[in-house]
C-alpha cells in the first residue's frame, strides 16, 4: 500500500469509496487524458464523474479562473456579482423554462436539496414522488428520495417518498411491453399511486439515471406523467445534474426527450457546467422560486471564480458545438461497443445516448447482475490505459462511460479497443 493511500485510510471515513485495488493519485490532465503520480497516462472516459465536460486543463477555463482570482475570489450573494448574473441570464434562456429564475449552489446534491425545499414550500406538502433506481445526492434530504439502496444509508427522512415505475426500461414488471404499452402501464401506476396520497409536492426524476447505470425510459414517459401531475397540481423537477449541457447529443437537456407537454417546473444542474469547479443550481418558474417567505443567501454558491469558469466553459461548449460532437462521436462509440458486446457472453446490454453510455454485465447464461465482473473490467481497463466508471441498480454491474464532450473519433476508437480487451478478460 502506498504512503498516500495509507494516510487516506487513517483520516477518511470507511464509507468513502476508492476505485481500484491500488488507488490512483491523479496529478494532472490535458484534453481527454490524465496522468497518475507514477507517470502513467490514461484516456479518461469518466471525466471526474461526468464533471470534466469539455476537456482537462481547457485553456479558456483556466485563464478565466486565473484572471478572476487575481481580481476577487469571493464576495457572497450579499453583493452584486456580475459573473453570476451573466451566467444566470444564459442558463435561464437555455433552460426553456418561462420567466425563469436561477439560484446557484456548490453541488448537485445542494441543488436538489434546494428544489425539494421550494417544492414542499410551494405545495405545503412533504410528499415527494421519485423514481425507482434513482440517485439525487448525498444530503439527508437527497438520500431519502434516492431509490437505490446502495446509495441511501438511512430510511430516516424529513420527507415521505413514494416511488414510481419507469426509470428502467429493460428490467422490472413492464420490461416485456412495447414502448407505448410501457408508458401506458407506468402512467396507470402513477395514477393509482396518487389515488392513495394526500397531495404530493413534486416528482423528481433523472431523464437518464446516472448512478443507476445510465438507464432511461422510452421518450415521452415524463410528458405523459406531466399530464397526470398537472391535473393534481404536482410539480415536475428534472434532475439534469448528469444529463445537462448536451451530453446526450440529441438534446441540450434530458427533459427535451419528454417535451410534448412543455418544460419542467424546475430543473437542477451541476457537474459539467463548471468543468471541475464546484457549481450547482436550480432553475425554476419565478412563481415557484419566489415562494420562500424567509431570508436566504448562499455563501459560496455563485462565487465569482466558479461563475467565471462556468461562463468560459459554457461559451466554449456552445461555440464548438460539443452537443453535436457528443451525438456524432457518441453514436459511433455506442455502435462500436454494441458490436463488441455481441461477442462477449457476460454483456447483457449496451445502452445510452450521446456520450453517456452504459454496459450492463451479468453472469453468463443468466440475467443475474455480476458486480465482480464489473470490478474486474474496471481494473483491466485501467491496466490498458483507460479510466471508466461503474454503477447499477440492484447491484453495481454496469460500466459507465462518459468522456469529455470534445472526444475525438480516434480517441473513441482507442477507448473501444481497450474496453474490448478488458471485457474479453472476464467474458
Image (cartoon, rainbow, N blue to C red):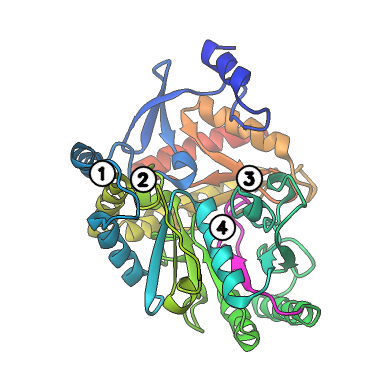
Residue 424's image quarter?
top right
Specify few, some or many for label 1: CA neighbours under 10 Å numbering under 14, 14-19, or 20 or more. Answer: many
Please state the extent of the stretch shown in magenta in the rendering: 198-216
In the rendered view of the protein, which quadrant contains the N terminus? top right
Q: Residue at point 53% right, 67% down?
A: 238
Q: Nearer the viewer, residue 144 or 420?
A: 144
The reply to whether the magenta stretch includes residue 204 is: yes
Q: Earlier in the sequence, mark 3 or mark 1?
A: 1
The residue to which callout 4 is attached is 113
Q: Are marks 4 and 2 in contact (CB under 8 Å)?
A: no
The residue to which callout 3 is attached is 391
- Distance between the Cα atoms at labels 4 and 1? 28 Å
Specify few, some or many for label 3: CA neighbours under 10 Å numbering under 14, 14-19, or 20 or more. Answer: many
Q: Earlier in the sequence, mark 4 or mark 2?
A: 4
Tell which tag, 4 or 1, sits nearer the viewer.
4
- Answer yes or no: is residue 45 visible: no
Q: Are marks 2 and 1 in contact (CB under 8 Å)?
A: yes
334 vs 1: above or below: below
Q: Residue at point 41% right, 45% down?
A: 278
The residue to which callout 2 is attached is 275
Specify few, some or many for label 2: CA neighbours under 10 Å numbering under 14, 14-19, or 20 or more. Answer: many
Q: Earlier in the sequence, mark 4 or mark 1?
A: 1
- Distance between the Cα atoms at labels 3 and 1? 29 Å
Tell which tag, 4 or 2, sits nearer the viewer.
4
Percent of width and height locating residue 315: 24, 56
The residue to which callout 1 is attached is 61
Specify few, some or many for label 4: CA neighbours under 10 Å numbering under 14, 14-19, or 20 or more. Answer: many
- Answer yes or no: is residue 126 visible: yes
Amino acid at each position: 500500500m502506498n504512503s498516500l493511500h495509507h494516510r487516506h485510510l487513517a483520516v477518511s471515513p470507511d464509507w468513502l469509496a476508492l476505485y481500484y485495488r491500488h488507488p490512483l493519485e491523479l496529478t494532472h490532465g490535458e484534453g481527454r487524458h490524465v496522468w497518475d503520480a507514477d507517470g502513467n497516462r490514461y484516456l479518461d472516459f469518466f471525466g471526474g464523474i461526468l464533471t470534466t465536460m469539455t476537456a482537462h486543463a481547457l485553456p479558456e477555463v483556466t485563464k478565466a479562473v486565473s484572471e478572476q482570482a487575481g481580481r476577487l475570489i469571493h464576495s457572497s450573494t450579499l453583493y452584486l456579482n456580475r459573473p453570476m448574473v451573466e451566467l444566470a441570464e444564459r442558463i435561464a434562456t437555455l433552460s426553456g423554462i418561462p420567466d425563469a429564475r436561477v439560484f446557484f449552489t456548490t453541488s448537485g446534491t445542494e441543488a436538489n436539496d434546494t428544489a425539494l425545499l421550494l417544492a414542499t414550500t410551494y405545495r405545503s406538502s412533504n410528499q415527494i414522488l421519485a423514481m425507482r433506481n434513482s440517485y439525487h445526492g448525498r444530503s439527508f434530504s437527497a438520500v431519502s428520495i434516492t431509490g437505490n439502496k446502495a446509495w441511501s444509508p438511512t430510511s430516516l427522512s424529513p420527507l415521505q417518498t413514494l416511488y414510481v415505475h419507469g426509470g428502467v426500461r429493460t428490467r422490472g414488471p413492464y420490461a416485456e411491453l412495447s414502448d407505448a404499452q410501457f408508458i401506458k402501464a407506468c402512467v396507470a401506476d402513477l395514477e393509482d399511486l396518487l389515488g392513495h396520497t394526500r397531495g404530493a409536492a413534486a416528482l423528481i426524476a433523472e431523464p437518464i439515471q446516472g448512478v443507476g447505470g445510465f438507464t432511461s425510459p422510452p421518450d415521452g414517459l415524463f410528458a405523459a406523467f406531466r399530464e397526470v401531475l398537472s391535473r393534481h397540481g404536482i410539480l415536475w423537477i428534472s434532475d439534469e445534474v448528469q444529463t445537462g449541457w448536451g451530453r446526450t447529443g440529441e438534446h441540450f437537456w434530458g427533459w427535451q426527450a419528454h417535451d410534448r407537454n412543455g418544460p419542467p417546473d424546475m430543473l437542477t444542474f451541476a457537474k459539467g457546467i463548471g468543468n471541475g469547479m464546484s457549481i450547482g443550481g436550480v432553475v425554476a418558474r419565478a412563481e415557484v422560486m419566489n415562494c420562500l417567505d424567509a431570508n436566504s443567501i448562499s455563501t459560496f454558491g455563485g462565487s465569482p471564480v466558479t461563475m467565471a469558469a462556468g461562463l468560459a466553459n459554457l461559451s466554449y461548449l456552445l461555440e464548438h458545438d460539443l452537443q453535436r460532437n457528443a451525438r456524432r462521436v457518441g453514436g459511433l462509440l455506442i455502435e462500436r461497443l454494441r458490436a463488441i458486446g455481441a461477442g462477449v457472453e457476460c454483456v447483457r446490454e449496451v445502452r445510452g445516448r450521446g456520450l453517456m453510455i452504459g454496459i450492463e454485465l451479468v453472469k453468463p447464461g443468466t440475467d443475474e447482475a455480476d458486480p465482480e465482473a464489473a470490478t474486474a473490467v474496471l481494473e483491466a481497463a485501467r491496466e490498458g490505459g483507460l479510466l471508466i466508471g461503474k454503477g447499477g441498480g440492484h447491484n453495481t454491474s454496469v460500466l459507465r462511460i462518459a468522456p469529455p464532450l470534445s472526444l475525438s473519433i480516434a480517441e473513441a476508437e482507442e477507448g473501444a479497443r481497450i474496453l474490448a480487451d478488458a471485457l474479453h478478460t472476464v467474458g
